[in-house]
């Protein structure tokens, strides 16, 4: 299956359609992620406003988080590392994470990077949780944000809301993660350009 079709399959999955949450960003605005977010990204891919391609290091990233997928907002590309396991739940969840960033870009949102990343990690955690992923497969220390995203997904499922203490824990982890500190990325603003 071509890469683009794999991404569309992930975005149309039942696991993705069940992602639904909101929280208040550090600047006071409400961030909501739901089925409509992913439908918007699907439309952008199908209308070629977002391109899907293999990542051959075409463009630099604002941070150095190692990843099998990343979204480049300057060029509207979702890039996947060649050789990444396309049928793995971990990669599928990472695609969901990057598509949250793509949505904020398409909507020209201006929001703190820490909240953009938090929304993406919560979405990633929701996807992993609803797909039945065994969280024991995550690496303590290197997958802290993904694990916290899954714990937040547990709270959403039980309380129908994002648990504030877990959200604070996720933001704190993001702020202290060296991969996100490059060029002041995590303390900066995300500015979507469509």
Image: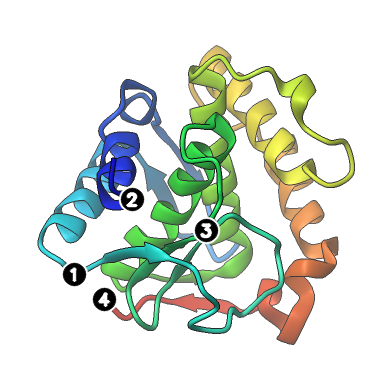
Say whether disc 1 or disc 3 marks the residue closer to the N-terminus.
Answer: 1
Q: CA distance from mark 1 to mark 3?
A: 22 Å
Element assignment for label 2: helix
Residue 32 pos. (x, y %): 39, 45
Residue at x 49% of width, y 30% of height: 127
Please tell me which residue lies in front, 69 or 110.
69
Please tell me which residue lies in front, 169 or 192.
192
Element assignment for label 1: loop
Q: Residue lying farthest right? A: 141
**Which disc number belongs to residue 3?**
2
Q: Is residue 91 above or below residue 88?
A: below
Say whether disc 2 or disc 1 marks the residue closer to the N-terminus.
Answer: 2
Residue 66 pos. (x, y %): 70, 61
Q: CA distance from mark 2 to mark 3?
A: 10 Å
Q: CA distance from mark 3 to mark 4?
A: 26 Å
Residue carrying label 1: 49
Query: Which image quarter: residue 34?
Result: top left
Q: Residues within 10 Å of mark 3 (few under 14, many from 20)?
A: few
Element assignment for label 4: loop
Residue carrying label 3: 82
Residue carrying label 4: 194
Residue 182 visible in this rendered orientation of the protein: yes
> Of tags 2 and 4, which is closer to the observer?
2
Q: CA distance from mark 2 to mark 4?
A: 22 Å
Say whether disc 2 or disc 4 marks the residue closer to the N-terminus.
Answer: 2
Residue at x 54% of width, y 57% of height: 25
């Amino acid at each position: 299956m071509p890469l683009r079709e794999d991404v569309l399959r992930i975005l149309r999955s039942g696991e993705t359609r069940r992602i639904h949450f909101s929280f208040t960003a550090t600047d006071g605005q409400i961030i909501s992620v739901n089925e409509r977010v992913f439908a918007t990204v699907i439309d952008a891919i199908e209308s070629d406003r977002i391109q899907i391609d293999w990542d051959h290091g075409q463009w630099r990233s604002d941070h150095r988080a190692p990843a099998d997928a990343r979204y480049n907002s300057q060029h509207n590309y979702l890039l996947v590392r060649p050789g990444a396991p396309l049928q793995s739940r971990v990669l599928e969840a990472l695609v969901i994470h990057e598509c949250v960033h793509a949505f904020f870009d398409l909507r020209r949102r201006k929001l703190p990077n820490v909240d953009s990343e938090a929304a993406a990690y919560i979405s990633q955690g929701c996807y992993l949780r609803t797909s039945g992923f065994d969280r024991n497969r995550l690496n303590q220390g290197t997958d802290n944000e993904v694990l916290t995203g899954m714990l937040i997904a547990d709270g959403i499922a039980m309380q129908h809301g994002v648990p504030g203490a877990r959200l604070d824990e996720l933001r704190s982890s993001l702020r202290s993660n060296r991969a996100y500190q490059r060029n002041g990325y995590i303390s900066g603003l995300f500015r979507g350009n469509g």
